[in-house]
Structure formats: structure tokens, C-alpha cells
Amino acid sequence: MHWVEKEETVRFNEVDEWGMAWHGHYIAWFEAGRMALLRRFDLLPKQLVALGYIAPIIRIQCEYKHPAESGDEIVIRTTAVKPEIAALIFRFEVIRKADRTLLAHGESTQVLITTEKKMIYRIQGELEKRITRLVAFCGEE
């Protein structure tokens, strides 16, 4: 599986009273990683809309392993997996750069619907081409 990596630094405003990154920021870091991956395949939100689609998140999960602290340099790793339905499925890892400790991992699922909010069951046309390239890239060893 091939991962796209994006580096960030945990900012002071992202930690709680105990000096650990607040749990909600991990979801924001997942989003930053997802955008970095989607940018490579012309699948950013505005580009989806231009194709006539939107992709709301219907499920997201995060498992926390170790806390990130203010000033930690982190690496957000993102990959996509082949969906069984008209959806986008991403997997994430947040790793402390200095020692490669896994801080958290998770997954999100977004359904693909038309801009008129109609469910689709099969991906076609240009959207199918872009998602096929994305999934093929991420599936490389």
C-alpha cells in the first residue's frame, strides 16, 4: 500500500490543559492528509463539484495510541482503498516524526452523490477515471 505523507507541527493552541494534542485535532490532521492526497488526482471538493458530485463523510473513526505534544513534528500518512460502493475510503496514520511512534490511526468513508443530492450506485465517466487512478496509486507496493 502506498501512502502520501504530509508534515505538520503541533501548535500550542492544539494542546489541552495536560499538554497533549486535543483529540479533535487528529480529525483535522486526517483532513489535511486527505486533501494532500486528493490534490494529486484532481479530486479536491471544488473539482468534484465541477464534475457534478459532492462527497459527504458518513463515517469517521480514530484510534488514539500515544499523545502528541506542543512542538512535536508529526507526519500524517494517507492512503485510499478500493470502495465496494460509490464512495471514497481513506486510511490515516499520524506518526511522531522524531521516533516514528504511531500516535493515532483511523479511517473515513465518504459517499458520492450528485450536486442535486441524489445517490449514485456506480461511478462513471471522468470521476471514475480519477478515482481509478487514485486507487491504483495507493494500491502500489
Image: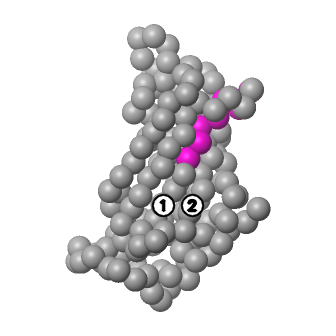
Q: Quarter of the image containing the C terminus?
A: bottom right
State the colouring used for the structure image.
Answer: one colour
Mark seen at residue 80: 2
Q: Is residue 88 left or right of residue 104?
A: left
Q: Say whether disc 2 or disc 1 marks the residue closer to the N-terminus.
A: 2
Residue 68 covered by magenta stretch: no
The percent coordinates of residue 101 (x first, y second) are: 68, 29
Q: Are marks 2 and 1 in contact (CB under 8 Å)?
A: yes
Q: Quadrant of residue 130?
A: bottom right
Mark seen at residue 89: 1
Residue 94 covered by magenta stretch: yes
Residue sitting at 74 percent across and 26 percent down?
99
**In the structure shown, which secondary structural element does the residue marked by tag 1 occupy?**
strand
Residue sitting at 65 percent across and 72 percent down?
136
Q: Is residue 34 left or right of residue 110?
A: right
Magenta stretch bounds = 92-98
- Residue sitting farthest toward the front: 84
The percent coordinates of residue 45 (x first, y second) are: 42, 65
